Amino acid sequence: MEIRSWLPPWIRPREDGDPRAAPFKAPSPNGASSNGHAPPPAPPPPADAGPAADTGPAAPEPAPPAPEPSPPADSGSAPAAEADGMGPDAQAELRARREQIVRMEEQALRQMQSVETQLRELERRQESLDDRERNLANQASELKQVKRRHLRELEKIANLTAPQARHVLLKEVEQEARQQAGLTLQRIEEEAKLEAERRARGILAVAMARLAGGQAGQTTTRLVQLPNDEMKGRIIGRDGRNIRALEALTGVDFIIDETPSAVILSSFDGVRREVARLTVEKLIEDGRIHPARCEEAYEQAKAEMEDRVIEEAERALLDARITGVHPEIVRLLGRLKFRTSYGQNVLDHLVECSHLAGLMAAELGASGEVARRAALLHDLGKAVSHEVEGTHAVVGARLARRYDEPEAVTHAIEAHHNEVEPRTVEAVIVQAADALSGARPGARGESLEQYVTRLRDLEDIAQRHGGVEKVYAMQAGREIRVMVDPGEVDDETAALISHQIATAVEREMEYPGRIKITVIRESRATTYAK
């Protein structure tokens, strides 16, 4: 590609052979006319002539009259003529400017060539992109055709059109979604029920604990009559030492208030309450009330309590017409006289169940002896359920087997709460008798049993720690008194035990207010002078 220069000819550098490239001649001293015009330029040399030689200045001649300047032969003759009339400095400056303009023209030419090269590259890339776009369009068209053929083959294989297959798929998805939604709804309902039950239990536990004193007061307290009001002060003793000794020995709260000539014994354990009553009656009868005498009266009351337990058990066996019972079972039955279940006396409940079971067995043609015996012993485990592991039904059956009770009786005992599947008619009769005795109006009270269970749990938590001898839950469960072995537990360990019990109670139980834990470490030294 030929690129022509855009510079005017008079600016371009003159090459050899150019007729306008004649060397510069200085004007003669008298060459200027009076009117200021330069002399006319010399005629150009012939084309084949070489560069004109400088002939030097002409001989001085008289100046002829200045001729009229003829117009330049071409557009470059006038600048050349003007350049011939310039001085050396002006010609050098003009030459430098010409060279600079030439360099600029060359630089502009190079830039134009670079732009043209880039333009050709862009055109090539555009053609490549156009080809690629045409290829992609062709491939997309082929893909659509293949997809249509594939869909027709699927419809042919499945014997379903696309709308039919879509309908089947949507139906399956809808069914699966409904199933998942049903399972999720069921899970949410179960979680809501569990949460509601947990909250209801918490609310009811707090409400029952607040009202336990009034509801359970009639069955957890015992009123002991005093001969006069002076006896109250003697029971309290100097600085309260007598009443503190009695409470520590019996594990019963001694409530002395404005009730005239009376002291109230409060405890959820009927055996403790009865032992405390016998102890107070012996002290009143003796008249001497001090800590040492309190201990003696307490030991005597415990011995009498064992006899009282046997008497109550024998009376119950006589009422139920049961004979041939092991002495240990007799003793355990007697202890149930001072135990309540949901506010119902357990021994009275057993006698009642025995009568009901005998009547039903007679109507059904079953063994009345087995039914009465199993009904009388079915709650035997409650006498020791707080001392051994397991439910009272399982513990009672274990005790019955240990003391050689018939297998039919032991099976009825362990099956009366469906721990095992009942296999005999007598076992079913015992279940029915138990339900009838407990369900009659006024037989049981739910709040009392929960109150007693809560206090017993408090004692069990404290009893787990090493070195503990006795534990008493007092003040309706607001205080726990722990007696420790002074030989095994020192003062620092006693403080640690109280902290551990408090932590265990906070972690395992729900209760209102606060519970006071008192650890008592008492050391005694006794010597007899002979």
Image: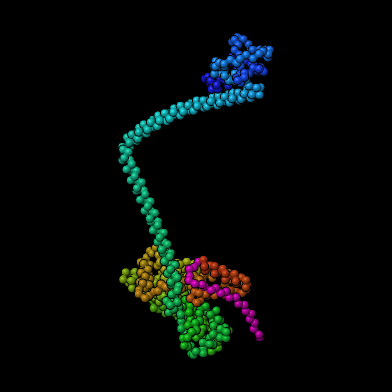
Q: With respect to residue 267, does 408 lie above or below? A: above
Q: How is the image coloured?
A: rainbow
User: How far from the left and from the top, in percent, is residue 320?
Assistant: 39, 76
Say which residue appears at 40% left-offset and 57% top-offset. 188
Q: Is 130 left, or right, of 175 in this rendering?
A: right
Say which residue appears at 50% left-offset and 86% top-offset. 281
User: How far from the left and from the top, in percent, is residue 509?
Assistant: 49, 68
Q: Is residue 220 visible?
A: yes
> 126 or 106: which is nearer to us?
106
Q: With respect to residue 227, does 519 lie above or below? A: above
Count of numbered labels shown in the rendering: 0
Predominant secondary structure, magenta span = loop
> 521 or 51: which is nearer to us?
51
The magenta stretch spans residue 259: no
State the quadrant of the C terminus: bottom right
> 152 or 471: which is nearer to us?
152
Say which residue appears at 64% left-offset and 12% top-offset. 52
Q: Is 465 left, or right, of 427 in this rendering?
A: right
Quarter of the view holding residue 213: bottom left
Quarter of the view holding residue 353: bottom left
Quarter of the view holding residue 423: bottom left
Q: Is residue 488 visible?
A: no
User: How far from the left and from the top, in percent, is residue 455?
Assistant: 48, 73
Say which residue appears at 47% left-offset and 66% top-offset. 390
Q: Which residues are magenta?
A: 508-530
User: How far from the left and from the top, in percent, is residue 500?
Assistant: 56, 68
